Image (cartoon, rainbow, N blue to C red):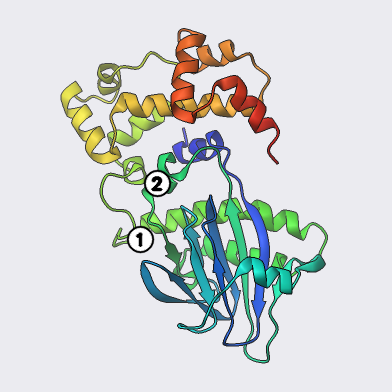
């Protein structure tokens, strides 16, 4: 079981391209409000600066990728201390048009930023992947693995427009970009980007990783802490302590979240009756499932399904 892929699928994670930003001047700047979801920037050409309220200006150059796992408000500028105008105002003054580019003009070196976001079901505080990452993750393009470098080059090329299906290709590859960027983040030698209890760290743990796979592969099974521990050849107390220390929650609390995420995917993607979905993810009664689902999402399963069907 590819747990990473399963989490992305269960939470409805997908990539969406936003209007690009292009400028040929040094004094430009745009301010981006809290996105409400994860976002990214890919520097397709030139260089610029990234600022947030909690970090000093960071220079970005062609090929760099910045992930914003919690959609943190930020600024992109042509110079470290340049003033920033709300992106909505820049977009109104320089409509993207058919090319989908907010072009600020200018007579200096050109910078082009491919922008996007990653909508998903739920909030980032409970998303296993996003909650394990810092607010800003920068993956230098030149030091990235060859696969990521290739994806960066393809997205940069496809977003110049003009070729049939280019938007579809670039949009599909944003999800690949996310996975490879996170992989590059957690495989860095210093591991500086992931600290403390972390689901990402747990994936590679020789004991806890297999336990996560078991729960994702068969959430319907009547798992207990003892049966999970026995399956991976650990004592119950040792397994419970290790799981909590690495993942940051208890095994059964994690199992409950896996079940609810799987149920949410079935509610979004199928017409199966709620009672059938409840049994398929391990609940003995529709009432118990509805209560657990409402506790997690704040709404009943039926209402969640109706709401999800109206979203783009």
Residue at x 65% of width, y 66% of height: 88
Q: Residues within 10 Å of mark 1 (few under 14, many from 20)?
A: few
Q: Which mark is residue 131?
A: 2
Quadrant containing the C terminus is top right
Q: Nearer the viewer, residue 230 or 236?
A: 236
Q: Residues within 10 Å of mark 2 (few under 14, many from 20)?
A: some
Vertically, is 141 above or below 209? below
Vertically, is 3 above or below 48? above
Q: Which mark is residue 188?
A: 1
Of labels 2 and 1, earlier in sequence is 2
Vertically, is 37 above or below 12? below
Across and down, in percent, residue 37 comes to 53, 50
Residue at x 61% of width, y 55% of height: 174
CA–CA distance in space, label 2 to label 1: 18 Å
Residue at x 66% of width, y 26% of height: 306
Q: 102 left or right of 39?
A: right
Q: 129 left or right of 178?
A: left
Label 2 close to label 1 by CB (< 8 Å): no
Q: Quadrant of residue 121?
A: top right
Residue at x 36% of width, y 66% of height: 54
Label 2 SS: helix
Across and down, in percent, residue 74 comes to 49, 66
Label 1 SS: loop
Q: Quadrant of residue 113?
A: bottom right
User: Can residue 217 be spotted in the picture?
Assistant: no
Across and down, in percent, residue 290 comes to 50, 16
Across and down, in percent, residue 167 comes to 74, 58
């Amino acid at each position: 079981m590819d747990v990473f892929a399963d989490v992305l699928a269960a939470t409805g994670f997908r990539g969406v391209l936003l209007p690009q930003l292009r400028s040929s001047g040094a004094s430009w700047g745009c301010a981006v409000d809290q996105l409400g979801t994860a976002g990214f920037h890919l520097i397709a050409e030139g260089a610029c600066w990234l600022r947030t309220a909690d970090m000093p200006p960071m220079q970005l150059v062609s090929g760099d990728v910045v992930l914003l796992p919690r959609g943190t408000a930020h600024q992109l500028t042509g110079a470290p201390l340049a003033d920033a105008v709300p992106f909505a105002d820049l977009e109104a003054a320089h409509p993207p048009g058919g090319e989908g580019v907010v072009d600020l003009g200018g007579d200096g070196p050109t910078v082009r930023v491919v922008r996007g976001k990653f909508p998903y079901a739920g909030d980032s505080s409970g998303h296993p992947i996003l909650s394990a990452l810092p607010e800003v993750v920068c993956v230098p393009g030149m030091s990235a693995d060859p696969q990521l470098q290739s994806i960066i080059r393809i997205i940069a090329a496809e977003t110049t427009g003009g070729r049939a299906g280019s938007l579809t290709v670039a949009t599909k590859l944003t999800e690949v970009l996310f996975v490879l960027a996170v992989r590059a983040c957690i495989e860095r030698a210093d591991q500086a980007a992931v600290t403390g209890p972390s689901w990402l760290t747990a994936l590679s743990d020789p004991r806890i990783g297999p336990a996560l796979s078991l729960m994702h592969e068969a959430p319907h099974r009547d798992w207990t802490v003892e049966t999970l521990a026995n399956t991976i050849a650990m004592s119950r107390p040792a397994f419970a302590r290790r799981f909590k220390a690495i993942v940051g929650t208890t095994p059964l609390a994690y199992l409950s979240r896996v079940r609810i995420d799987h149920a949410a995917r079935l509610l979004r993607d199928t017409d199966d009756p709620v009672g059938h979905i409840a049994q398929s993810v391990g609940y003995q009664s529709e009432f118990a499932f509805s209560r657990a689902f409402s506790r997690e999402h704040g709404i009943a399963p039926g209402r969640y399904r109706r709401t999800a069907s109206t979203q783009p």
